[in-house]
Image (cartoon, rainbow, N blue to C red):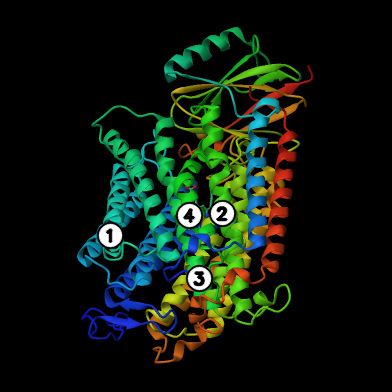
Amino acid sequence: MTSPIKPPDGNWWDQPVNRRESIWLGLGVGWSLILFGWMSAWTRVGDQNPIGETFRIDAEDYREKLTDYKDRATETDDGLVPPDRDVYLQAMRFQWDGAPVVLETGTEYDIHLNSFDVQHGFSLRPEDALSKQINLQVLPGYEWVVPMTFDEPGTYHIICNEFCGQGHRSMHGTIVVEEG
Amino acid sequence: MAHALDVLGLFDNEYRDDGFRTCSVTGLEVHRSVDNYVKLFGLTAVVALLFGGIFAFTVAMTRWEVVGLLEPADFYTHLSMHAWNLLIFWMVFMEIAILYVGGPMVLGRRLPITTVAKAGWAVMVGGAVLVNYAIWTTEPPNEAPLLTAYVPMPVSPLFYAGAIVFILGTVVAALPFFATMWYEKRENPKKTLPLVSFAAFVTSIIAVEALVGGLFAFVPTLFWRLELIEWWDAAWYRQMYWIIGHGTQQINLVAMIAVWYFLTHVVAGAEVVSEKVSRTAFILYLFFINLGAAHHLLSDPAVSTGWRLWNTSYAFYGATFASLIHAFAIPAGIEAGRRKRGKGGGLFGWLTSAPWSNPVFSSTIFSIILFGFLGGITGVMMGQLQLNMTWHNTFATVGHFHATVVLGTTVAFMGLIFFVIRTMFMRQYISERLASIQPFFYSAAMGIAVLMMMYVGILYGVPRRTAEVVENIPGTEFSLSAAAPLFAIFGIFALLAIAGGVLFVLVAVGSLVFGDRVENGDNADLVADGGLGMAQDPDDPVHAYEMRGTFVLCLVFLAAFAITYLLNWYLLTQLWSIGA
Ligand code: HEM
Ligand SMILES: [Cu+2]
């Protein structure tokens, strides 16, 4: 009795399973474990992980930090040169406050991300290699500190990729990475 | 007798004195109440499909910036209409119909408490109308909600109210299904449910979990919008929202798989090669699938790494494993079932001899293949913590979910509608030929459009949900113009896919209005080779038949999976170093 629209009768649980189906089940378990194992190992040994410390913070408090950071940073024609390894950005309709910013290759920076108003998306890529792109969610009320080390110099463009209102499409900023 | 309002005679099948009829295709005893409510919900779903489909045109033609149809202000409104009418209303009305098929119809019972079903339908329609009204009348400072209505973006309170009404209506409409299960179990405590009913039951439980999550997201947000409370938390909303936002996708998935088992059996003679294995897969879904909602939060700041790893992997890929089980069990069911019917020479004879000109069959098969290869594989890619950074909020995400909800679920549900037209509305297709072509045309065009969506997202980082980014980003020289050629291919195939969708509505509605009535014996061509009785011969067990062809297909699938996985990881490792 093997119709999906009739109740199976008798001892259906003990019906044998076809050999090829059993092999497939084994492959499925193996593949599932590989998927999990690789992903979790990469958080320890890999270089690309969406992982960083998070703090709760009011938009205004974050603005104060940002203002203080800007005071300490050096203004150049290309943008702000941060005073140390911390880089502050705040997303707000419809700009990236803190950008443009000038960084160096080979230095690990702590990129601080926060939103002043609604949710935004931090989408970053170098100008000359569009397939190298990463995307992080930016939330109001949270400060996310994501370390990044750039190895190629160039102009990196930030596009907002979370709908944040009329004008969303114009929300753009840059990170200029110079040879360090 | 037909109802006075039923001028088209759509609700007037002939029933015996006890209100039942015997379906000539499935052999099921179908009660009038089941027929009528499946039709009611199915028709409502098709209206939503048609309406949402109109916005597929305006949205796709805006994203193809060479055409650039809509102004940004209108674009977000249209995108919201597209998402809610298709992803929510088309699918959920269909799913209630599927619960009534999987419950009372398969069990040969009447639909109990029909007034509740009617009330549920009315409340759902009310909620849907309210949501549409709220979206369409969006005024500044409010913004269009899109699918997600993320706080704290100001969205009309009416929208949240409409969404809540719709959720409550859905729960009410599901009650007759639960009542059916209750009566069935009380009367036959020892009898095991048929697989399709069991799948419908699992769907309904996952649905209740999802709907409750929806209330957690929308009710406090409505209070906040009405200024009754001051509190909101963007991360909390996201977590609650995705319980329903992704939960409804799991409903789509499980309902679709129930439809796969049902239709492949009925029109192609598929059988269940192992009740034990297939049911275990559904149980795995029950336990693990809802964890998957976490894959929407992988690139979020507010959830811990361990939480993300555990949940996005559905606890060590428990639900992915379940899907791999169905990926074998369903084609194997077709293969072994057809070999048993003498229709399976060689490795793939069971497939080549199958009823490809029957749109019910071809829709189901395209749904299975395209869901697996395009939707399932990419879902696992973007559901990996690190790979998610390269998919999140890009157009590739849109590609992924059009592969699941359009190529997978919508195509399967179209197959079900084709089936319902013939066996419940009792109408011939207005054109056999157009009906046979539709699944091929739609699936092929949409398949290519979906691939382009994925490519522009992954290879050029084109974001989703924006009116302008390829030709021009206002205020800067920079743009993603390198993606323009792929967008041209996308645009053309999106238009073809929309034409395929129009064809579906024309054939479906045309058949209902103008199709010849099916008379005794007219549906014989739908019946699987050799009839369905064969599946019930205890001396001819299906698991003993060959499953070589399926095995080969599954190995090809696993190879495609592994290659895509490697490519995605290769791209990721090209990036600079990110994260602690
Ligand atoms: C020919 C058919 C279709 C075409 C050409 C099409 C095209 C599109 C495009 C271009 C977008 C997206 C854009 C953006 O993010 O800027 C989109 C979004 C979307 N579509 Fe479709 N679509 C089709 C059918 C469907 C169907 C049948 C469903 C559901 C069952 C669906 C569900 C969605 C959803 C949920 C979104 C996302 C809305 C959001 O971001 O909030 N689409 N579609
Ligand atoms: Cu933004």
Q: Which of A64 and B317 is in front in this view?
A: B317
Q: In which quarter of the image is residue B217?
A: top left
Looking at the image, residue B85 sits to the left or right of residue B114; the answer is: right
Sequence-wise, the earlier of marks 1 and 4 is 1
Where does label 3 land, which residue?
Answer: A2
- Specify the amino acid type for callout 2: Ser
Residue B3 vs B94, above or below: the answer is: below
Looking at the image, residue B7 sits to the left or right of residue B538; the answer is: left
Quarter occupied by the N terminus of chain B: bottom left
Asked whether the residues under the numbered discs 4 and 3 touch, taking CB atoms below 8 Å apart as contact, a structural biologist would say no
Asked whether the residues under the numbered discs 3 and 2 touch, taking CB atoms below 8 Å apart as contact, a structural biologist would say no
CA separation in Å, label 1 and label 4: 20 Å
Sequence-wise, the earlier of marks 4 and 2 is 4
CA separation in Å, label 3 and label 2: 20 Å
- Specify the amino acid type for callout 4: Phe
CA separation in Å, label 2 and label 1: 28 Å
Farthest residue, direction top: A72
Asked whether the residues under the numbered discs 4 and 2 touch, taking CB atoms below 8 Å apart as contact, a structural biologist would say no
Q: Nearer the viewer, residue B13 or A156?
A: B13
Respond yes or no on whether mark 1 lies under 8 Å from ligand 1. no
Farthest residue, direction right: A179
Quarter occupied by the C terminus of chain B: top right
Of circles 3 and 2, the one toward us is 3
Where does label 2 land, which residue?
Answer: B323
Where does label 4 land, which residue?
Answer: B282
Q: What element carries label 3?
A: loop
Q: Is mark 2 on a helix, strand or loop?
A: helix
Of circles 4 and 3, the one toward us is 3
Instruction: Give the x, y percent position of residue B200.
Output: 40, 60
